[in-house]
């Protein structure tokens, strides 16, 4: 335990909160049915391996746009053994700074091979998932992310984009339009359909949305860089940057000029892209670079524990900024994070979460890891895919 005087300095708790106050799962992973009704405090889920704790975090992660914290195909989420094509659902009541909102999402019965996620907000069906970003911001840390700095850039980009959704909900829509145009163009090139009008239209869309995507990432990284430049308690300072050709163009001139360059580069690259698939240039090639500030060391060369501490530092800095800018800290989904921290770091993490008023959903196998939270959290016991208040 750390004493009160060396706990990190935090901003006062946000008065408004973002919190799930009801969560129901239907045919979701190992759950036939489950229902939780926490209040706005952090949520602690304790139970043995394989009990269904991560599945609950994954269900919460579907309240934001995207494929959830496992990056799953939707069919894979449906409970094995369910009647064929029965679908699955996650429904939630979420308290937000602008009032409560009811979110329903899942895969509808009869969707067959289609990998389409249905979304309802306050009972009304909405097209696509990007509208979710206007209501819920969330970010997760999971055990596979221990390798985030060793793995290809895609994982770091997705991590960064999730941070950007919190500041700029329209980012989700732009990113999805960019990726759609990228896929369409790749398909035409692959099929050898060199239809100039069609390709130019897609490249135009890629240039406009792609530069907006890159600019939004740069802006958020700029703000985060200031917020996590210095160590906070036991969490290290992190130096952040986005690296890529498009970012270089944006640094060197106006956004419109960068759009022109991207459009021209795509046009000039058609032949090469037809051979290699994808596109040689664009914000889908960018990377989030992270360095340990005090050690002046790239994150990839830091120890496992240091890398985890860097990720926590970034997530906490993001939560502090969002609490100040949007009136509420994001939901934090922290899978097995507490168990991997020493007592001092664990206490500092809990202290920050409480100071931010963040509803952090935390899993673990050992009650003792969450002991410093005392009565400040909702506690549930998870066993064989049954959830019980603890
Ligand atoms: N589609 C599915 N249908 C039924 N069961 C599934 C499905 N997908 C995963 N499971 C099962 O869900 C169980 C619980 O997984 P989960 O990852 O939530 O456990 P956990 O409590 O987080 O465990 P650990 O502490 O080991 O991380 C696993 O046994 C897994 O096999």
Image: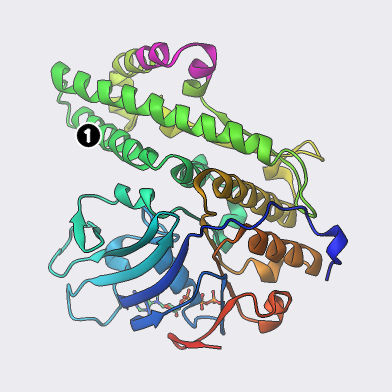
- Give the residue at x 69% y 43%: 299
Q: Quadrant of residue 221?
A: top right
Q: Position of residue 86 (x, y in %)?
A: 18, 75
- Which residues fall within the magenta stretch? 248-260
Q: Is residue 290 above or below residue 19?
A: above
Q: Position of residue 367 (x, y in %)?
A: 66, 83
Predominant SS of the magenta segment: helix
Please tell me which residue lies in front, 117 or 2.
Answer: 2
Is 221 magenta? The answer is no
- Give the residue at x 36% y 68%: 93
Q: Position of residue 82 (x, y in %)?
A: 23, 81
Per the image, the residue denoted by label 1 is 184
Secondary structure category for the residue under label 1? helix
- Give the residue at x 51% y 47%: 159
Left or right: residue 328 versus residue 82 is right
Left or right: residue 16 versus residue 61 is right
Q: Quadrant of ligand 1?
A: bottom left
* Quarter containing the N terminus: bottom right
Residue 63 visible at all:
no
Residue 181 visible at all:
yes
Please tell me which residue lies in front, 260 or 64.
Answer: 64
* Quarter containing the C terminus: bottom right
Q: Is residue 382 above or below residue 252?
A: below
Q: Quadrant of residue 381?
A: bottom right
Q: Is residue 380 above or below residue 342?
A: below
Left or right: residue 103 versus residue 188 is right
Q: Position of residue 119 (x, y in %)?
A: 25, 59
Count of marks overlaid on the render? 1
């Amino acid at each position: 335990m750390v004493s009160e005087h060396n706990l990190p300095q935090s901003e006062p708790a946000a008065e408004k909160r973002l919190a799930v106050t009801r969560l129901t799962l239907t045919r979701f992973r190992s759950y036939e049915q489950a229902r939780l009704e926490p209040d706005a405090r952090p949520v602690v889920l304790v139970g043995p391996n394989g009990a269904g704790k991560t599945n609950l975090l994954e269900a919460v992660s579907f309240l934001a746009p995207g494929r959830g914290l496992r990056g799953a195909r939707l069919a894979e989420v449906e409970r094995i053994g369910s009647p064929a094509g029965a679908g699955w659902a996650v429904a939630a009541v979420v308290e937000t700074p602008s009032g409560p909102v009811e979110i329903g999402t899942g895969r509808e019965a009869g969707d067959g091979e289609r990998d389409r996620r249905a979304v309802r907000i306050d009972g009304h069906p909405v097209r696509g998932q990007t509208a979710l970003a206007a209501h819920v911001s969330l970010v997760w840390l999971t055990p596979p992310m221990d390798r985030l700095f060793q793995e290809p850039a895609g994982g770091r980009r997705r991590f960064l984009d999730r941070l950007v959704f919190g500041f700029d909900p329209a980012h989700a829509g732009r990113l999805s339009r960019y990726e759609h145009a990228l896929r369409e163009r790749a398909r035409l090139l692959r099929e050898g359909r060199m239809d100039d009008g069609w390709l130019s239209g897609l490249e135009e869309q890629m240039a406009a949305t792609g530069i907006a995507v890159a600019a939004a990432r740069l802006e958020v990284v700029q703000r985060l860089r200031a917020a996590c430049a210095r160590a906070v308690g036991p969490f290290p300072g992190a130096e952040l940057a986005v690296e890529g050709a498009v970012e270089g163009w944006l640094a060197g001139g106006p956004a419109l000029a960068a759009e022109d360059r991207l459009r021209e580069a795509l046009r000039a690259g058609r032949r090469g892209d037809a051979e290699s698939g994808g596109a040689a240039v664009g914000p889908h090639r960018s990377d989030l670079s992270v360095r340990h500030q005090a050690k002046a060391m790239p994150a990839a060369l830091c120890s496992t524990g240091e890398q985890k501490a860097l990720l926590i530092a970034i997530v906490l800095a993001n939560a502090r900024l969002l609490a100040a800018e949007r009136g509420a800290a994001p939901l934090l989904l922290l899978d097995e994070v507490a168990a991997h921290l020493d007592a001092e770091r664990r206490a500092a993490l809990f202290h920050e979460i409480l100071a931010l008023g963040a509803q952090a959903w935390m899993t673990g196998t050992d009650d003792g890891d969450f002991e410093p939270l005392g009565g400040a959290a909702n506690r549930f016991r998870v066993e064989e895919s049954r959830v019980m208040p603890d």
